[in-house]
Image: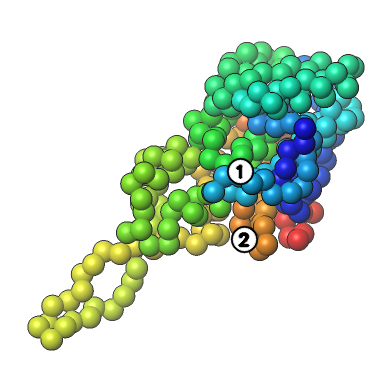
Amino acid sequence: MAHKFGGIWTQKKLEILEQYLSFYAQALKNQGFCLHYVDAFAGTGSHNPEVNDVQSPLIPCEDLRGSVVTALTTSPAFHHYHFNDIDPEHIVALGKIRDEYPQCKINITQLDANDFVPEFCSRLTPNDRAVIFLDPYSTQLNWETIEHIAKSEKADIWLLFPISAILRLTPKKEDGLKESWRPIVSRLLGKSDWEKALYKPIEKPPISDLFDIQDESNTAARINVKELELWITARLREVFAWAAEPVLLTNNGKPLFLFYFAISNKAPKAVGLAKKVANQIIQKYKYRR
């Protein structure tokens, strides 16, 4: 069974991921660490780049072609691979892929990613290092889960942040915000006071009517896409040792995801090397359409 979803952004993210995994495994292969690759939303492990009829109304259905097979064919190999998905049909498909790669140590779990990731991070020892790929289908990933990775100080992440969902959940005018959407945005952004950051008062000249009564309405407008990107980047840098500027992935010219890299290891040498390599990879794709 192949996952139906994807587009040009899919190939771009997979090429970025593949290049970093190759660098990471090569750089650490003689350092004595046990290397783990983690895919928290592993899907079926293959993809069919079509639009799924049951895709989320918030985000065009994304694909995971790739991430599973890309990781399994990376050279040098990781010591352990961890593929998680909550869908039982996806678990069956992942099991078949495991049978195709008997030389790899593959663990498959069927959990909510927000339960799986903290549990995995809690088991990391000083001898472990990990790359965690977070590619949620829509709005499933809690900010709290991202913070668990940052606190581990042993994992790098590649994160597909669903900026299109944030844009749809936060209309341009603040008075259009639906009350039912507020907790979703708070969960995604990890802050309850996000509204103050995302909405700014509209500056307008005072207008008086015939009775000299001025318009004192407090309508506020949402910040633009670039400002939102900068705010999310700053949020990641609050919790990680370092986070790169993202690659903006688009669909027909519309923002879809921000593809982020971040490192949790605070050691200056580790941060310096990761920063150099991640920036080199990202700059190759940042403006490629």
Let me know if residue 203 appears in the view.
yes
Question: Mark 2: which secondary structure?
Answer: strand
Residue 281, visible in the rendered structure: no
Percent from the top left, x then y, of residue 194?
A: 40, 47
* Residue identified by numbered label 1: 54
Residue 257 placement (x, y as % from top left): 62, 49
Amino acid type, callout 1: Val
Residue at x 81% of width, y 16% of height: 105
* Residue where numbered disc 2 is placed: 254
Residue 73, how many percent across, how many down? Answer: 88, 30
Name which of mark 1 and mark 2 comes first in the sequence: 1
Q: Dot 2, crowdedness within 10 Å: few (<14), some or many (≥20)?
A: few
Q: Quadrant of residue 52?
A: top right
- Residue 90, x across and y down, in percent: 70, 27
Q: Residue furthest front?
A: 53
Write the residue at 69% across / 26% down. Answer: 89
Closest to the observer: 215 or 110?
110
Q: Quadrant of the N terminus?
A: top right
Q: Please tell me which residue is depicted at 36% across the width and 44% down the height of the picture.
A: 180
Left or right: residue 74 compared with residue 278: right
Q: Nearer the viewer, residue 210 or 285?
A: 210
Instruction: Tell me, for residue 173, which label it has, or none.
Output: none
| Mark 1 in CB contact with mark 2 (< 8 angstroms) | no
Three-letter residue code for mark 2:
Lys
| Discs 1/2, front | 1
Residue at 61% over, 37% down: 136
Vertical comparison of 157 with 163: above or below = above
Q: How is the image coloured?
A: rainbow
